[in-house]
Amino acid sequence: MSSWLGLKDHGGAAVRIAVDAMGGDHGPSEVVPGALDYAAAHPADVILLVGREDAIRAIAPTLPPNVEIVPAADVIEMDEHPALALREKKDASILVACDLVRHGRADAVITAGHTGAGMAAAVLRIGRLPRVDRPALAVQMVRRGSPFVLLDIGANPDSSAENLAQYARMGTIFAERVLGIAEPRVALLSIGEEKGKGDLLIQRATELLDESGLRFVGNVEGKDLTADLADVVVTDAVTGNVVIKFFEGLSTFIFDLWRAELSAGIRGRLAYLLLRPGIGRIREVFDYEKAGGSPLLGVKGVVIITHGRARRRMIAFGVDVAARAARERVPERIAEALRAADAAADQVAEMPAAPALAETGAMEGGA
């Protein structure tokens, strides 16, 4: 079964997805219809709409059998300070949604609400995985063909080289299990493609990734992000956030230029008629709404944080990403990978040192 969005029922184990119905710039008016679109395409999965029941019922007076409402009285607004709001609003929809995952009543949570509040609620209520120092926020970046994963894009402004190496391992699991990329190529975002280029953070992360057992291909520059050079690109949160916002702004700027040119006079309109099929294909490549949202990797449950401006279509795709990550047990697989990496490192550390060479005279055949 598929919906008007092109969402397909992929089968597999049924999952329960907690949807923060109050989050985002548009709240229930877009979140609820998007969640219902997903529910219609995946009748075996259960959608838990978390929020004010009267607001949800105003959008959807009747609900299908696989959709339930979980009441939550409070809402964390987009302009509130996340830590303060989480302390004061104990019954906020994002907290209630994360509690559903914490207590095993849901397999994943998705929110279009305040990014900082969503990340903080996930860490406080669901908790970090063992061995994870800092969770990372990832995003699927569009390019011709399959997308690539960029992380971190906003969770940790101050990351260590060890953090970057851990992000690479977590991003690899997501790329493998959710995007279906076999043996993802990992790269560091830097100022030059040659090894050794970059600051001390990048140089140390390069050493760690060389020893990680991942398919590490070295550095990539900003100009190469849309080329097919890597499937997982790792950077610090400040750089990652600047990259995605510049990418969004540049894409909008280019399409606005095209729109102005093709709507100017009869020649522009004739050109549009000739170019329309190609423009449609280009728009398909740049359709960032299909990415659905950003996974917060490194917590004990599946958490998807989508764009605050997300509308119905993007919400539906975001729920789809959450469901696929839950079905593939991404948090558990990340925990297993980190545990195996630590075990391998401990084994290397316990290996006896190579025997020292004898005196120079012995090397020459004796004194």
Image: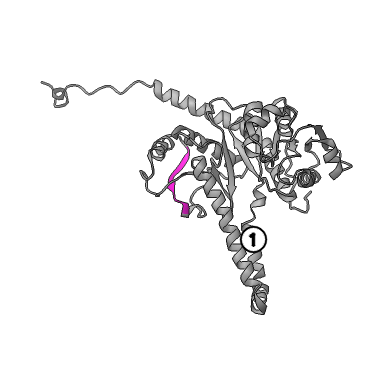
Residue 9 screen position, x and y as percent:
75, 45
Residue 196 screen position, x and y as percent:
35, 43
For the C terminus, the quadrant is: top left
Residue 49 screen position, x and y as percent:
79, 37
Question: Where, by quadrant of the figure, is residue 197 drawn?
Answer: top left
Relative placement, left or right, of 262 versus 354 is: right
Question: Where, by quadrant of the figure, is residue 15 drawn?
Answer: top right
The magenta stretch spans residue 219: yes
Residue 207 in sight here = yes
Mark 1 — residue?
Answer: 283
Q: Nearer the viewer, residue 321 or 31?
A: 31
Q: Amino acid at mark 1?
A: Arg
* Crowd rating for badge 1 (residues with CA inside 10 Å; few <14, some 14–19, many 20+): few
Q: Is residue 119 above or below residue 60?
A: above
Q: Nearer the viewer, residue 345 or 156?
A: 156
The magenta stretch spans residue 99: no
Residue 328 in sight here = no
x 55%, y 42%: residue = 153
What secondary structure is the magenta-colored segment mainly? strand
Q: In the structure shown, which secondary structural element does the residue marked by tag 1 occupy?
A: helix
x 71%, y 43%: residue = 24
Task: Give the extent of the magenta segment.
Answer: 214-222
Q: Is residue 106 above or below residue 9?
A: above
x 69%, y 42%: residue = 112
